[in-house]
Image (cartoon, rainbow, N blue to C red):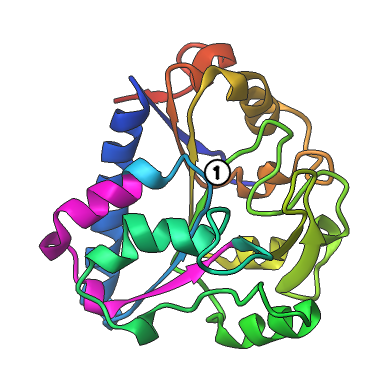
Amino acid sequence: MSKPRVIACADRQTVARRARELVSAQIVATVSRRHVFHLALAGGSTPQPLYERLAADPWCVPWPAVRFYFGDERCVSPDDPESNYRMARETLLDRLPIAGEQIERMRAEDRDRERAAADYVRKLPLKLDLVLLGLGTDGHTASLFPDSPAVRDQQRRVVVTTGPKPPHERLTITPPVLRDADELLVLVTGAEKANVLKQVLLGDWNPHVLPAQLARRGTWIIDREAAGELPSGGFEED
C-alpha cells in the first residue's frame, strides 16, 4: 500500500491555501490532457475555507471543464442548513462560471433512499479524478462510519447509511469509489483530531474500525494542532 503524503501547515487558512494550490494545479493539468475533470466535494466545516479560496479567483482554473459530485449527503432538503450541497453551493458553486448541468448532487431528500442511491451510481463516472475528504473524531470519512455495513460494501458504489448524529440518514460513496479514484485529498484541522489522525495514518490496518484508513494512500493536508501526535520528521512542512 502506498504511504500517505502528509503536509503540515501552520493553521487552518494555510491548509486552505495549500489545498487550493494542489486542487487548481491538478485540474489544470488534467484538463490540458483530456478536457474534463471529475471532482467529488466534501461536506462539513473543514473544506469551507478551501472552497472560498477557490471561488475568490475563479479565472485561474478552467471551471467549465469540471464536473462536480459529492462524497456524501445528509437526507435533508438541499436548502437545509445541514445539507452538504447547500454549503458547497453557497461557498463555491454559486460563485463559479459554471452551468447547472455540471453539478451532480445527491438527491438524498427523496423518500425512496435506495432509489436515490442507485440513481447516483448512474451519475458517477467510473473513476473520479479527485475526491475531497475530511476526518471525523471517530475515524470516519465521507459518511463511512466505524463498523457500518457501508464500510464493508465492495459491490455497490453508493449506499444508504446511518450516522451517529442527526440528521442520521445519509447517502455515501463506498470503498470501491475511493479505491478507484485517481487522487484523494484529506483535510484535517484541530487538536481534537490529533489522536485519531495518528491512529489512521500509523496504526494497524483496520478500516472497519477506522474507515478513514481507506484514504491513507492520499495526500493529507493538516494543521499544526492536528499534527500534534505525529512523530517529528514524518511529514512535510509548509
Locate the C terminus by quadrant. Answer: top left
Q: Report if residue 172 is visible in the image.
A: yes
Magenta stretch holds residue 75:
no
Mark 1: amino acid: Gly
Q: Where is residue 110? Give x, y as percent.
A: 69, 80
Is residue 89 shown above or below 67? above
User: SS class of the residue under badge 1?
Assistant: loop
Q: Quadrant of residue 170 in the image?
A: bottom right
Residue picked out by circle 1: 134
- The boundaries of the magenta stretch are 50-71
Q: Quadrant of residue 8 in the image?
A: top left
User: Residue 228 vs residue 32: left or right?
Assistant: right
Q: Where is residue 195? Give x, y as percent.
A: 66, 19
Is residue 188 shown above or below 80? above
Q: Report if residue 173 is visible in the image.
A: no
Q: Where is residue 26? Give x, y as percent.
A: 30, 59
User: Residue 67 vs residue 111: left or right?
Assistant: left
* Closer to the camera in the image, 233 or 197: 197
User: Residue 81 vs residue 129: left or right?
Assistant: right
Q: Where is residue 158? Give x, y as percent.
A: 71, 72
